Structures are given as C-alpha cells and as structure tokens.
Image: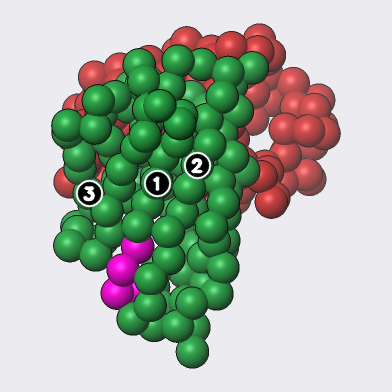
C-alpha cells in the first residue's frame, strides 16, 4: 500500500495570505495525484488532478505542483470560503487508492 | 449537470444489513466506473468499492470484502451497495462518486450508524 502523508496537520493562515500544503508518497506515484477540498457537512470536491491540472470551475488561485513522491497545493490569496480540510489522493496504484490524512486550513 | 443522490442510510444493529442506493443524472451513467467511499465521524476518507461501467469488474477494500456487494443498474442509472454483517466500525457517511482516474463528482452522502 502506498502511504500518503500530509503536512502540516493544521495550518493557520490569515485571509489574503498564501497557503502551502504538502503531501508525500511512500513511493513514486508519478503525477497520478489529486487534491480535494472538504467543508464541514459537505462531500469532498475535486480541486486538482494529474498533480497540477485544475478541475472544472476551480479558481486560478489554487495550484498544484510536484511529481514522484513530493507534492504541493498552493492557495495564492486565501478567501474566507477556502478554510476547509484538504486531502491528497494517489491513483497510481489503482485500485488500491489511498488518501492522505488531511490538512485542516484554519483562519489565523 | 452531474448529480449523484444517495439514500438508504440509517441506524442498524451489529450483524444487521442495509442497502444503499445512488441515483445518477446529468451524464451517461453506463460510460463510467462508479465507487463507494466512506468517512467515519471525524476521520478521513476510505474507498470501499468500485464497479466497472458494465458491472463486470468489481473491487473491494479488504475491510469490507465478503460482507459488502456493489452492483449497478445502467437502465435505471443507479448504483447500489448491499452491506451485510455490519460492524460498529462500518459507521460512516457513505458517498457514491464517479470515477475518472480520480473522483470527479460526489454525492452528498448518507449516514450509516451501526449500534445496539
């Protein structure tokens, strides 16, 4: 099983500032990585796939980078609606998909 | 627009059974793999099962293998999850989601609580 490790567990950032979330895979997943956003009481929403491609309707302030084992989700200027939990997920080892444990992005 | 609507959750005793349904609309259901994914209260995401577009290929997580059965009816644009021998650790919100190498659309989820 590929283990996905996200850091930090909680990130406190002020609105308007940049947030950088990290995700590490225990072995290479190439660029087969997705990011999801989940707000309380809601289903996850796909943000990024292929490590860096924004999903339909996702604002340009969200960007993804990385390949192999190290990945980053950057939110360039935080809006109030961006405070949520973010999950990374590898799909290189399909069907044994694995998620990271999540990073909670909170208002500082 | 793509819509996935789950139903069938509820409270069930350990050892009991429950059948979840997911009604799909806004896309050609028979073209896509579909999945069930669950999230225990306050916890992360765990995939449960996949089914291919025709229903001929199925995968289960080890945690549910032998107890859960995924199926679909392409004529009704519906996905199902039959859950037997339920355990307390199966308590979770269950989401159906469309698979496109990643899960691009999710339902709102249905809560399954296993408790005596």
Colour scheme shown: by chain
Residue at the far bottom: name it: B116
Label 2 crowd bin: few (<14), some (14–19), many (20+), radius 10 Å? many
The image's mark for residue B22 is: 2
Query: x, y percentage for residue B104?
Result: 48, 24
Q: Earlier in the sequence, mark 1 or mark 3?
A: 3
2 and 1 marks on the same chain: yes
1 and 3 marks on the same chain: yes
B93 vs B19, nearest the viewer? B19
How many discs mark residues in the rendered view? 3
Q: CA distance from mark 2 to mark 1?
A: 6 Å
A24 vs A80, nearest the viewer? A80
Q: Chain of mark 1?
A: B
The residue tagged 3 is B60
Stretch of the chain drawn in magenta: B83-87
Query: x, y percentage for residue B72?
Result: 34, 37
Residue at image x 20%, y 39%?
B58
Q: Chain of mark 3?
A: B
Label the green chain with its letter. B
In the image, taking residue A32 as reference, residue B42 lies left or right, namely right
Q: Earlier in the sequence, mark 2 or mark 1?
A: 2
The image's mark for residue B80 is: 1
Quarter of the image that includes the N terminus of chain B: top right
**Helix, strand or loop at disc 2?**
strand
């Amino acid at each position: 099983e590929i283990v996905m490790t996200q850091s930090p567990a909680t990130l406190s950032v002020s609105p308007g500032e940049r947030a950088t979330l990290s995700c590490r895979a225990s072995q290479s997943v190439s660029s087969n990585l997705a990011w999801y956003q989940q707000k309380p009481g809601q289903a996850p929403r796909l943000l990024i796939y292929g490590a860096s491609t924004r999903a339909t309707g996702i604002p340009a302030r969200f960007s993804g980078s990385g390949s192999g084992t190290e990945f980053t989700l950057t939110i360039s200027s935080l809006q109030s609606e961006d405070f949520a939990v973010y999950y990374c997920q590898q799909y290189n080892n399909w069907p044994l998909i694995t998620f990271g444990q999540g990073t909670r992005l909170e208002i500082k | 627009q793509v819509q996935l609507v789950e139903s069938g959750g509820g409270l069930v005793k350990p050892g009991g059974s429950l059948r979840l349904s997911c009604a799909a609309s806004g896309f050609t259901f028979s073209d896509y793999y579909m999945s069930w994914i669950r999230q225990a209260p306050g916890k992360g995401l765990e995939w449960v099962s996949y089914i291919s577009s025709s229903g001929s290929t199925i995968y289960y997580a080890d945690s549910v293998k032998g107890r859960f059965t995924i199926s679909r009816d392409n004529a009704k644009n519906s996905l199902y999850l039959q859950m037997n021998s339920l355990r307390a650790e199966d308590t979770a919100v269950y989401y159906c989601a469309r698979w496109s190498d990643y899960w691009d659309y999710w339902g709102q989820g249905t809560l399954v609580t296993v408790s005596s």
